[in-house]
Amino acid sequence: MTSREMNSRELKVAIRHSFGQPTSAATGDPFSLHLDFSASPGFTILFGPSGAGKTTLLDCISGLTIPAQGSIVVAERVLFDSKTRTNLPPRQRRIGYVFQESSLFPHMTVEENVEYGLVDLPRSARRERASAVLAAFGVDSLRMRQPSQISGGQRQRVALARALVTEPSVLLLDEPLAALDAATKSKILDDLRAWNQTHHVPILYVTHSREEAFALGERMLVLEAGRIVAQGPPHEVMSAPLQESVAQLAGFENVFDATVESQHPERGTMTCRIGSSPVLLETPLVRSHVGEMLRVGVRAGDILLAVMPPTGLSARNIFPGRMQSLEQRDVMVRAMVDCGAMFEVHLTLAARDDLKLALGSGVWLVIKTYSCHVMRAAAQT
Amino acid sequence: MAIDWQAFFLTLRLATAVASILLLIGVPIAYWLAFSRWRGKFLAEALVALPVVLPPTVLGFYVLVALGPHSPLGRWCQSLTGHTLAFTFTGLVIGSILYSLPFAVQPFAAAFRAVDRRLMAASSVLGASRWRTFRRVVVPASRPGLVAGFALSFAHTLGEFGVVLMIGGNIPGVTRTVSIDIYDQVQSSNYASANQTALLLLVLCFGLLALVYGVNPRTRVVGAGE
């Protein structure tokens, strides 16, 4: 396929949209989606925490949700454009959409489900197309079964077949394999990849699974709070530590130089020394080697503060320290705690008063492993 | 004197007509109530639920006035047919439709609301029009609610009294229904045959409700909202 052909099949999205419930007036805006990207034929992984706006994005592309403004173009066909007031209804968009849970029509057989999107064809052509795609996904023997009579993996195969039989110009997959075991999952992904070898459509694939991202990913978009915070090949975006600029975007008050002391692949963690201090921080494992210099970011609001040695916690990082400064900022308190390295911690006024915190008092800091975000220093890349 | 079979079959004819017409007009109303995003929808919901709480005589009185020769509707009917609809079977059907409306519309709307939105979304993404989605996805998924609404409006019409008395009076073979018949029997101290007719109605209604609950154990009868 030439690059000209690739471009002509691209999905281009540039939208702004408010979603979710507005919180209180005091805490500000409802979530807003603010995205501008394009996806070529092949897999594009959408990765990010729940509430980041991944499903809202897919709903906007499929027409189930109407964005406040922007445009959505698939294969040079305008599906939505707020400027020209173009808004094709979902049924005219020619989009394949497979949801997280099976959404097969429970009162129809597998075959009737797959033929559902082919009303315009004569009966014999419908049969033929349906059995071809059912065969491609290895479920042609289930044609006459009801969705309740087949397994979860088979249901998602049928759901994929139902979406693909209409020859969509873009495929949206919202964690379609999340509930399946690894072996089933990888077989389905193989079939999907094989299908796209001949169809060449952009596939947006939402997942939380690193394995799936690595297995599929030609390209990956990381979404956080409605924005793209990182993109690139999955092995760069994921296993490599985040770029520091990305981290600063996410707002870490504490950013330390750190050296990898030891790695524990079996636990998925590693131990990093902060600067030249005695503080050893347990962090998630990223691709790196022992002795490598990295940066670790911790949000001030993610650190717990205790006035007695805490016990019985799941958190792996508990450091004794001394209160160096306490400063009231509006309705929050910014504490600086010296544990050998200086940590910025954010507390509420009530917490300060309840704990009777004072300068010089002895405290303990508690930091979860997954609150430590390992980054590569911006200068190194 | 035993059961007044003429009154009995008239009542069955009335209930069948009313439940059938309510299936036709109740489904679009319920669909609109279930899926419209209009802010003033609660007003329509209250209006539909009104016959649940309104005394049948109040409803019957207004229908009688509306059908009578002094209202535009009554005059229009009179000019068409030569007589008003008051004290006719058709008048009885119109009154009963209003009286039994919530017993059809509320179960229908509850069933439509309970349809998995993702199934409807899947249908429209697969290229189906709203009508096709309704026919192929919404109706099959709400079949128990549709059966319940039909059976409830049928049973409710079987047993109505106040509206019939106001609109229809007591004309044998035209507007004399079973409940009017029972009332008459009791008035003339004919308890034995009142009991026979009442028992028949009791068994019939119980059978219908058993059918409704058998089809869908979660259906609530009165004010079956969400």
Image: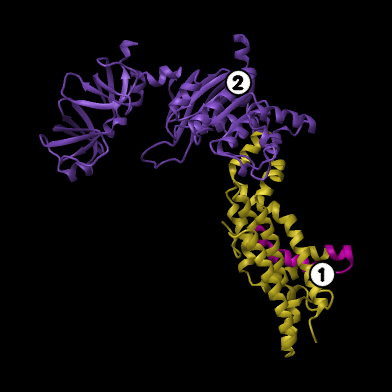
Residue B48: % across, % down: 64, 60
Residue A194's disc number = 2
**Does dot 1 land on a helix, a strand or a loop?**
helix
Residue B186: % across, % down: 71, 86
The range drawn in magenta is: B76-105
In terms of depth relative to the viewer, which is nearer, B215 or A349?
A: B215
Q: Residue at x 77, y 64 (%)?
A: B16
Quadrant placement of the N terminus of chain A: top right
**A153 over A271 or under it: above or below:** below
Judge from the rendering whether residue A342 lies leftward or rightward of residue A269; answer left or right.
left
In terms of depth relative to the viewer, which is nearer, B77 or B48?
A: B48
Quadrant placement of the C terminus of chain A: top left
Where is residue A378, by image quadrant? top left
10 Å crowding of disc 2: few (<14), some (14-19), many (20+): few
Residue B120: % across, % down: 63, 41
- Find disc 1 in the rendering and name its residue: B89
Residue B135 in sight: yes
**Residue B140 within the magenta-colored segment of the rendering:** no
Judge from the rendering whether residue A239 lies leftward or rightward of residue A53; answer left or right.
left
**Does dot 2 land on a helix, a strand or a loop?**
helix
In terms of depth relative to the viewer, which is nearer, A114 or B185?
A: A114
Which tint is chain B? yellow
> Which chain is rendered purple in the image?
A
The number of numbered badges drawn on the structure is: 2
Where is residue A326, by image quadrant? top left
The amino acid beneath tag 2 is: Ala
